[in-house]
Amino acid sequence: MTVLDDGDHVVVVGAGLAGWRFVEALRREGYGGALTLVGDESHRPYDRPPLSKQVLVGKWPAEHATLATDDHLAAADVRLLLGTPATRLDVATTTVHLADDTALAGTHVVIATGSRARLLPFSAGHQLHTVRSIDDVARLNVDLAPLEAESVVAGIGGGFIGAEVATALRTRGLRPLILEASERPLINVLGPEVSSWLEGLPASAGIELRTRQKIDDVYRADGDFRVLFASGDTLAARAVVVGAGAVPNVEWLATSGLSIDDGVVVNEHLLATDRVAAIGDVARFEWANTAGSELTRIEHWQVANDHAGSLAHYWAQGVAATKLLVPYFWSDQYAKKIQLLGHPRPSDDVTRVAGSSDEAKWVALYSRDGLVTGVVTLSQPRALMLSKHFLETPTQLDAALAAAPWIN
């Protein structure tokens, strides 16, 4: 590879966390060349986790989530192009074409376009809410403001974002009702055993959860929404929030010739070609871990942040990261904190090593073929971090159980 020099021009497409952190990291690495950051939203780069945790509850104004303050922008010395999405990438010339017919000719391109909320084909269409962007939350807050206490707000999907939104709505005095298609929320993410340990949390927070819900449609009627179930029954709600997962923003790359498979396929250095890289939610990357290596896409804040630093170091210094990437995820829901280290499969074995469901506080290890693949905790942050080293080098489950750092 060729190390960047001050004659280069790096174009970063995507002004979310991954794109902005890459800009900052590249400057820290000493790169002094041209740098352009393109974003489809009109807002400066901002942090998404506070939207469902602080902004929706009313603890923070939206601007508190901004990452690129005036001082940060000045330090980054970056050309910022907002409100204009990229429409095409010419890989051969590393030229990014924008919706306003601008053509940005760079020497290197970073794809950091992230993912967007998955929409469902219901009759109510865009009158339904998602919680992904600042504009999403602003629109939801406008619709929630006139609602009376205990008004029913239906949440379609009981995963991480659905649970966080329901928690925020309950804090506001509304009555969230979670409609989950699966047997239990998070069963396809955390597996059947761990999801069963979390099953009682909504009720403990005064929130109703209904599982195995088959929804045929959501439509407007008499000023409210109606959720139509496959059984023929209906549910009236004043507002509806959909949390049905996310899809990577790759459509603009359809003619690029890059390999697209549930994201932009990149190697262990996050490169799709020598001069085109992808980071964050949009990247389907070769992840080296203690169990080997696998091609995966991980929608975690921390992964986006780490990708940005790793790619900046590699392009600026020509040196790859030597430490294994250990994915980390957290979710604040129902007055509890779920934390996960690693990227275990739902089918991995689970061993609970401390606490219990009754205490609503516990620690568990995931393992596969006797090797630790993940650590998950409920309201045990210290125990989680004390266990991180099990995922930094290959660790047998028996050795982890013998070390038992969670009892210290």
Image (tube, rainbow, N blue to C red):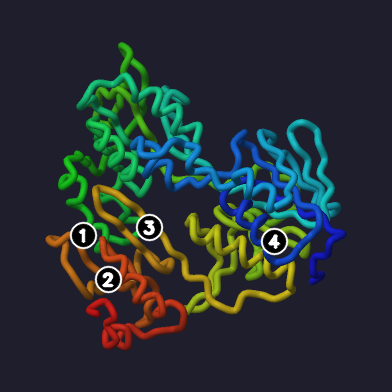
Q: Amino acid at mark 1?
A: Trp
Residue identified by numbered label 3: 330
Residue identified by numbered label 1: 197
What element does badge 3 sit on? strand
Q: Amino acid at mark 4?
A: Leu
Which callout, 4 or 2, points at the residue further toward the start of the chain?
4
Front residue of 288/2: it is 2
**Is residue 243 among what the camera can see?**
no
Gap between marks 2 and 1, in whole Å?
11 Å
Give the number of the mark in front: 4 or 1: 4
User: Left of 322 or right of it: where is 26?
Assistant: right
Count neighbours of disc 1 (C-alpha within 10 A) and say few if under 14, some if 14 to 19, many if 20 or more: some
**Residue 364, labelled with which disc?**
2
Residue 240 percent coordinates (x, y)? 35, 29
Q: Residue at x 85, y 52 (%)?
A: 93
Front residue of 84/42: it is 42
Residue 377 percent coordinates (x, y)? 29, 65
User: Left of 345 or right of it: where is 205?
Assistant: left
Gap between marks 4 and 2, in whole Å?
37 Å
Which callout, 3 or 2, points at the residue further toward the start of the chain?
3
**Is residue 102 among what the camera can see?**
yes
Which callout, 4 or 3, points at the residue further toward the start of the chain?
4
Residue 199 percent coordinates (x, y)? 21, 53
Which callout, 2 or 1, points at the residue further toward the start of the chain?
1
